[in-house]
Image (cartoon, rainbow, N blue to C red):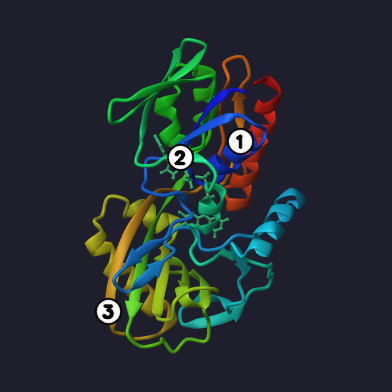
Amino acid sequence: MARVAVVGAGIAGLACAQSLHNAGHEVHVFEKSRGAGGRMATRRTGHGSFDHGAQYFTVRDPAFRAVVDQWLANGVIAPYAGRIVHLHAGTTRPLSHTEQRYVATPAMTSVCRALSANMDVDFECRITAVTPGEDGWRLSWEEGGESGFAAVVLAIPAAQALPLCTAVPELATQIRQGGHAPCWAVMVCYDQPLALEFDAAFVSGAAVGWVMRDASRPGRAAGERWVLHASAEWSRVHLEANAETVGPMLVEAFHAAAGIHAEVVESRAHCWRFALSDGLSAGSFWDVSRRIGICGDWCADGRIEGAYLSGTGLAAKLLPII
Ligand SMILES: Cc1cc2nc3c(=O)[nH]c(=O)nc-3n(C[C@H](O)[C@H](O)[C@H](O)COP(=O)(O)OP(=O)(O)OC[C@H]3O[C@@H](n4cnc5c(N)ncnc54)[C@H](O)[C@@H]3O)c2cc1C
């Protein structure tokens, strides 16, 4: 049995951790936030909850399909049946290609909460250094603690992984190929239902690129709450803007694109600096001799499915050598 550290309790880290744990290894997960989920995030406000990161996922790979079927059977996820359209300057048209979308219930964090249920996770613990130690690696964290492990998995965005890989230049070179585009997200609450013939839309020709009515998803409380995601270009240009100015700008862009006037009760903006990645399709990167590896959406296809498979794929590489 090996002692393995996994940095990051997003879906990639937890998928990897669970595979290693199920094979009988002693796995410790470190997460800088207060809960599991990473970008599969949920924000609670006085006006209800919002999934302000990823809002749904799709399934293409048969191995992931089998996992998704289990989650469906356990009620951790449900199919999404809302009306999705393309929206451009007040005009909608149906999607030409539709695929089944799934949402976690009752919140997007539910999948990662389920994956972490039997796992040893240290929350609010940011790893600040990974250095060679006796028989493996030493991990140090913000509060000044440190501990030794036989193997280390970094399941975090490329830009956040780079400073932790100074002791492994070959891995750092591979990590430099990866990256994420930013995304500003706005959570908006209205006191009246919006008179719209859709529940979600891919928006073109506007600052917003995607909008979704939160309560159109299964297991959500009633209420007119919308999540707006700015386009990658707009988010990049406004990366350093402050949340108080970004919120109203994106709400106005949504109203203009949808051709509506509506009274907003509250809006809050959140900037995802490392939101979406084109993915590298390598799956994961692994230094066999030094027993350190990296996984995450950016190593795969940039989506939830890819992140999950990146995590289990890295575990499969690790298992024969620990
Ligand atoms: C706005 C937005 C919309 C999206 N839409 C979709 C979509 O529609 N469909 C889809 O499939 N995907 C979508 N995605 C992408 C999807 O969310 C990601 O692909 C997936 O969640 C990535 O999982 P991950 O485990 O690789 O990384 P993450 O979820 O980012 O997890 C990494 C974790 O590591 C933690 N961490 C980072 N550094 C440290 C450190 N030093 N110490 C400890 N912990 C650390 C972070 O707090 C985080 O919890 C979207 C993402 C965003 C932001």
The answer to which image quadrant residue 252 occupies is bottom left
Q: Which element is circle 1 on?
A: helix
Compared with 92, 314 (above or below) is above
Q: Are marks 2 and 1 in contact (CB under 8 Å)?
A: no
Amino acid type of the residue tagged 1 in the rendering? His
The answer to which image quadrant residue 280 occupies is top right
Residue tagged 2: 121
Q: Which element is circle 2 on?
A: strand
Amino acid type of the residue tagged 2 in the rendering? Val
- Looking at marks 1 and 3 on the same chain, the residue that comes earlier in the sequence is marked by 1
Q: CA distance from mark 2 to mark 3?
A: 37 Å
Q: Position of residue 56 (x, y in %)?
A: 56, 63
Residue drawn at x 48%, y 43% is 9
Please indicate, yes or no, whether residue 281 appears anywhere in the rendered image. no
Q: Which mark is residue 21?
A: 1
Instruction: Characterize the local packing of mark 1: few (<14), some (14-19) or many (20 or more) Cα atoms within 10 angstroms.
Output: many
* Disc 3 CB within 8 Å of nearest ligand 1 atom: no
